[in-house]
Image: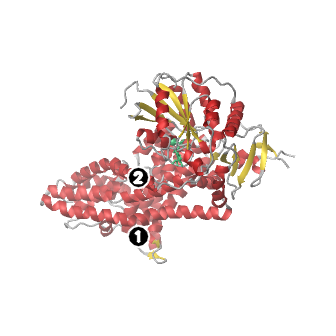
């Protein structure tokens, strides 16, 4: 924690200009960086011990007149920060490859800073890009035109950081002066920006031409569609098939560890506890971490390449049909990792109505917390047949079908709500800036995915562990290992009638109920109970045990459908409450998604049983 | 005859911004101006993707995609 009066600088600029990367470099933090506009949607504060400064990273804005929620957050907080005396100045980050557009905001910010008597520093970022194109900018002209110091840097290569550090220190010191006053409205500033960009030496579309060449293919009628479909199929197929060997690896590690550790406790309650609760409960959950790793890895590649904005564009029309926007694409896609950041990222959608529909439907995406549940049930129910020489697997296809099911349900829900509840709400234009294509940085993405999987395990871990311990204790006592005569079984009898129509016994009832805390808990809970029930001392994978326990295909599919729809995540509900300002919609969603999930599961169970007869 | 609008531009065609449809809200019109679509500014259509997807335009050295509803509210002066 920094002291109360640490000098603070504010990092502002256009979306996708590299503010967050710069912020991360200066503070050593790891805020999310990605190659599309509107990644940062909330303020982040960090400190640079080297400079003795606090820095605040803002969401990107096109102007000081906000249109989207993230811009609103930025502009409102800017006004608030500029009233605080510890805020010494503003750092305006400009994307040098899109200078004319960047200069408009730069001039607006300069007006604002002068009005509040704060010095401003202009940072020309992405210098590596223009050096690669062998063009130059005239910083002197810019400096004169902007009335404040200008430094050239590359947040990527760290070029120019020495100058930057000096300039930042100077900016935060008391001898920096606000820039001279500049009057003029939007039109005037726009003209000024154009003139300045031309004089400084970056005209025309030189830097955009390589982007156009790729877009000619990526956005064409035939190839555009092929690339889009291929990317999506690849994404969902890879989550299953790439992570399979990794998961097998983790599973065998967990099992050999169990074989090594459990005997150390001899025989009796402690040994049973370690085997059933720790390895059976917590260990079974750990097995699914690799899937989350692979998922974030692939999404990371897409985010960095610049393709996501194109995919959003291609999807705009079809999504509009269902009441969503092309800008819903990124929240919906990243919702497959986790609904929480996805709901935040919908702040970037201009239309309040489409934003609301996006937030409502994001929880239906098959998030990574559902992966363990899907993975377990698919492994237990679906045979591992492969076709086309191992290219397509039945289990992989089942995964794909579940993803598709989530997406289709979301579209139907959104389409129905669009036509009924939200008919009259107003709309806003769809404007999406297309970022340049960039080669993703493998190392950075690997690190990001590793971080993400680690957070997933460490965040869900404690809950899962506690639940596993409680479930174990209730399932083990009073008859030391007789699950069917345990406390848990007596509690379970109460729940059983609810799940009986789905062909599920009380054990599943308990697991489902527990997973309203968080979905991942399902696997750990079931693992613990089956661990107690399995009398033999051998260690098997949980899927194998589940298969042996006699779960029918109909009930298994019903379970999958239930998990695909139900809103079993307290954290998501809390975030929805934060974004919507009341509990009304979140609680409505909770009830309706749970009912819908149950009804859908019941239908599936009935239909499969009927077909099987 | 209706004035040509941004949506009418063919790929690689350039034009100058003339004015906006009166039905466009002031707040939204201002945003378009801030992004570069102001009177007399030159715009170029880069790509008209299939299936009614938003068209891609270059204006003030930046690339934006704009949907049909919105693009058709920006009127143009097409040079021959
Ligand atoms: N080549 C190059 N790429 C950069 C540089 N700085 C940032 N980038 C890339 O530009 C993209 C955007 O970076 P961010 O830091 O997320 O941009 P931002 O300004 O925080 O964007 P928003 O949060 O959306 O406003 C990422 O793909 C970065 O890797 C740079 O100096 N050179
Ligand atoms: Mg950012």
Chain containing the residue with disc 1: A
Is residue A571 positioned above or below A377 on the image? above
Numbered tag placed on residue A33 in the rendering: none
Confirm whether residue A34 shows in the render: yes
Other-residue count near label 2 (Cα within 10 Å), few / some / many at <14 / 14–19 / ≥20: few
Residue A44 vertical position relative to residue A296 in the rendered view, above or below: above
Residue occupying the point 28% across, 58% down: A283
Residue A125 found in image quarter: top right
* Circle 2: element type: helix
Secondary structure of the residue carrying numbered label 1: loop
Tag on residue A447? 2
What percent of the width, then of the height, locates residue A546?
A: 32, 65
Residue under the point 35% across and 66% down: A551
Q: Position of residue A36 (x, y in %)?
A: 56, 48
Figure quadrant of the N terminus of chain A:
top left
Is the residue at mark 1 from the same chain as the one at mark 2? yes
The relative height of residue A454 versus residue A122 in the rendered view (above or below) is: below
Between B29 and A212, which is closer to the camera in this rendering?
A212
Q: In this view, does A422 lie to the left or right of A85?
A: right
The residue closer to the viewer here, A249 or A341, is A249
Q: Which residue is drawn at 17% across and 53% down?
A: A478
- Crowdedness near tag 1: few (<14), some (14–19) or many (≥20) residues, C-alpha within 10 Å: some
Residue holding disc 1: A382
Q: For residue A505, what is the image quadrant?
A: bottom left
């Amino acid at each position: 924690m920094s002291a109360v009066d640490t000098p603070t600088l504010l990092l502002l600029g256009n979306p996708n200009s590299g503010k967050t990367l710069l912020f991360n470099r200066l503070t050593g933090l790891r805020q999310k960086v990605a190659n599309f506009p509107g990644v940062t949607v909330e303020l982040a504060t960090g400190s640079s011990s080297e400079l003795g400064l606090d820095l605040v990273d803002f969401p990107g804005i096109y102007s000081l007149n906000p249109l989207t929620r993230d811009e609103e957050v930025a502009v409102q907080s800017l006004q608030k920060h500029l009233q605080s005396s510890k805020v010494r100045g503003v750092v305006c980050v400009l994307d040098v490859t899109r200078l004319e557009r960047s200069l408009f905001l730069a001039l607006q910010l300069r007006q604002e800073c002068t009005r509040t008597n704060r010095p401003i520093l202009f940072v020309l970022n992405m210098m590596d890009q223009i050096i690669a194109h062998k063009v130059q900018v005239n910083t002197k002209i810019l400096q004169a035109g902007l009335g404040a110091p200008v430094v050239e840097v590359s947040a990527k290569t760290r070029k120019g950081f020495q100058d930057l550090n000096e300039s930042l220190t100077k900016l935060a010191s008391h001898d920096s002066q606000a820039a001279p006053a500049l009057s003029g409205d939007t039109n005037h500033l726009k003209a000024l920006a154009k003139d300045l960009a031309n004089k400084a030496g970056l005209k025309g579309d030189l830097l955009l031409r390589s982007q156009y060449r790729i877009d000619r293919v990526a956005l064409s009628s035939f190839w555009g569609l092929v690339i889009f479909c291929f990317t999506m199929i690849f994404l969902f197929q890879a989550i299953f098939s790439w992570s399979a060997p990794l998961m097998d690896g983790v599973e065998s590690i967990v099992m050999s560890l169990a074989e090594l550790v459990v005997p150390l406790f001899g025989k009796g309650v402690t040994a049973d506890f370690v085997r059933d609760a720790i390895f059976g409960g917590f260990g079974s959950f750990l097995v699914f971490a690799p899937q989350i790793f692979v998922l974030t890895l692939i999404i990371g590649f897409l985010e960095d390449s610049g393709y996501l904005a194109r995919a959003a564009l291609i999807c705009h029309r079809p999504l509009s049909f269902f009441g969503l926007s092309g800008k819903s694409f990124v929240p919906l896609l990243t919702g497959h990792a986790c609904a929480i950041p996805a709901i935040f990222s919908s702040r970037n959608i201009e239309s309040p109505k489409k934003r609301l529909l996006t937030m409502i439907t994001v929880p239906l995406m098959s998030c990574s917390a559902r992966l363990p549940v899907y993975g377990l049930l698919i492994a237990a129910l679906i045979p591992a047949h492969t076709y086309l020489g191992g290219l397509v697997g039945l289990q992989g296809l089942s995964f794909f079908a579940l993803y598709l099911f989530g997406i289709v349900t979301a579209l139907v829900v959104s389409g129905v709500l669009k036509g009924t509840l939200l008919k009259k709400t107003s709309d806003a234009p769809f404007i999406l800036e297309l970022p340049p294509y960039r080669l993703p940085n493998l190392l950075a993405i690997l690190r990001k995915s590793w971080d993400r999987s680690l957070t997933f395990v460490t965040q869900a871990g404690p809950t899962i562990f506690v639940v596993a311990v409680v479930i174990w204790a209730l399932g083990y006592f009073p008859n030391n290992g007789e699950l069917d005569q345990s406390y848990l079984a007596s509690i379970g009898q109460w729940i059983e009638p609810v799940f009986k129509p789905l062909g599920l016994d009380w054990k599943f009832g308990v697991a489902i109920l527990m997973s309203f805390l968080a979905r991942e808990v399902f696997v750990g809970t079931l693992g613990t109970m089956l661990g107690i029930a399995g009398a033999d001392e051998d260690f098997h994978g949980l899927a194998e045990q589940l298969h042996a326990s006699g779960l029918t295909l109909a009930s298994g599919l019903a379970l999958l459908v239930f998990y695909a729809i139900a809103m079993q995540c307290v954290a998501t509900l809390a975030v929805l409450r934060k974004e919507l300002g009341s509990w009304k919609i979140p609680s409505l969603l909770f009830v309706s998604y749970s009912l819908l999930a149950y009804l859908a599961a019941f239908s599936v169970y009935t239909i499969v049983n009927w077909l099987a007869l | 005859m209706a004035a040509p609008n941004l949506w009418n531009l063919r790929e690689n065609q350039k034009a100058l911004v003339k004015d906006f449809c009166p039905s466009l809200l002031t707040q939204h019109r201002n945003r378009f101006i801030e992004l570069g679509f102001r009177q007399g500014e030159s715009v170029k259509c880069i790509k008209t993707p299939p299936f009614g997807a938003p068209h891609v335009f270059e204006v003030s050295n930046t690339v934006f995609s704009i949907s049909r509803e919105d693009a058709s509210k920006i009127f143009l002066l097409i040079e021959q």
